[in-house]
Image: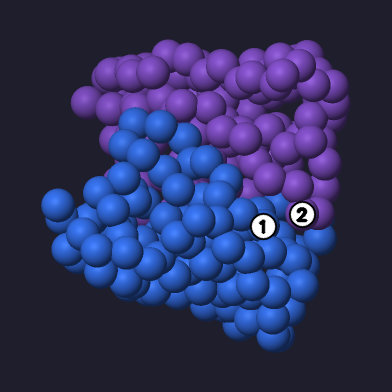
């Protein structure tokens, strides 16, 4: 069974600070996706990284896929209250199934 | 454009009662369809997925079952609910295999009393 561990589980920081969320596994994935989920809604895709070592930027969010394609990180610069939510990583193994991480609950304090 | 509808949004059911949650997708053909369950504020557990009509793969042996009677319809059922079936149930579709993203419905909050 493929497992994706996210850390930290909870993170509460002040507006304007920087943060990094980690997604780690002992398994290799063909791609890694990041989702954000608001309360009472389904997760929404933020980005997909495919190549080992790949870095993608989405405004203040920077996503990196590990060289060995076993881990990923999400870095947020100058966090804003609108960044608050549950962040989920999900790994694809080349078939029709995604394995989701344990989630990071992020709260940005104004 | 593609849309996914999931209902009901909330449901309160007594222990031992049956369950039927429905999910339909519009604007796409032959999607892969998924049912996930989410514990409060945590990750998603894959329950069932389907790559075509009548094709159901079960990931976790439990009190639930799934059916796909039509190409874009996915149903999650139970004959007798348990307290442990409470949770947030999410339906999703994927347009292809591999690196394609999942598109989620807005979920059903099920409380078994």
Q: Position of residue B12 (x, y in %)?
A: 28, 18
Q: Position of residue B61 (x, y in %)?
A: 57, 47
Q: Residue at x 36, y 61 (%)?
A: A104
- On residue A48, which mark appears? 1
Dot 2: chain letter:
B
Nearer to us of marks 1 and 2 is 1
Is residue A74 in sight in this rendering? yes
Q: Nearer the viewer, residue B21 or B42?
A: B42
Q: CA distance from mark 1 to mark 2?
A: 8 Å
Chain rendered blue? A
Residue B89: which quarter of the image?
top left
Is residue A12 in sight in this rendering? no
Q: Nearer the viewer, residue A24 or B52?
A: A24
Q: Are marks 1 and 2 in contact (CB under 8 Å)?
A: yes
Residue A57: which quarter of the image?
bottom right
Dot 1: chain letter:
A
Q: Residue at x 79, y 30 (%)?
A: B31
Q: Colour of chain B?
A: purple
Q: Position of residue A45 (x, y in %)?
A: 57, 46
Q: Is residue A29 above or below residue A81?
A: below
Give the colour scheme of this rendering.
by chain
Q: Position of residue B94 (x, y in %)?
A: 73, 37
Viewport quadrant of the N terminus of chain A: bottom right
Q: Nearer the viewer, residue B73 or B83?
A: B73
- On residue B99, which mark appears? 2
């Amino acid at each position: 069974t493929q497992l994706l561990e996210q850390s930290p589980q909870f993170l509460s920081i002040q507006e304007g600070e920087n943060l990094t969320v980690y997604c780690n596994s002992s398994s290799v994935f063909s791609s890694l996706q990041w989702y954000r989920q608001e309360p009472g809604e389904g997760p929404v895709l933020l980005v997909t990284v495919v190549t080992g070592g790949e870095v993608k930027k989405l405004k203040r969010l920077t996503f990196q896929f590990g060289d060995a394609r076993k881990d990923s990180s999400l870095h947020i610069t100058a966090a804003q209250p609108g960044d608050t939510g549950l962040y989920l990583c999900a790994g694809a193994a080349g078939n029709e199934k995604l394995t989701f991480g344990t989630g990071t609950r992020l709260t940005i304090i104004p | 454009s593609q849309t996914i509808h999931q209902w009901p949004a909330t449901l309160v059911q007594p222990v031992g009662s049956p369950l039927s949650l429905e999910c339909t997708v519009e604007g796409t053909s032959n999607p892969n369809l998924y049912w996930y369950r989410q514990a409060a504020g945590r990750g998603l557990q894959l329950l069932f997925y389907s790559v075509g009509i009548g094709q159901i793969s079960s990931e976790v042996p439990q009190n639930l079952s799934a059916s796909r009677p039509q190409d874009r319809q996915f149903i999650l059922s139970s004959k007798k609910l348990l307290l442990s079936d409470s949770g947030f149930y999410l339906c999703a579709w994927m347009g292809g295999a591999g690196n394609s993203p999942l598109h989620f419905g807005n979920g059903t909050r099920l409380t078994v009393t």
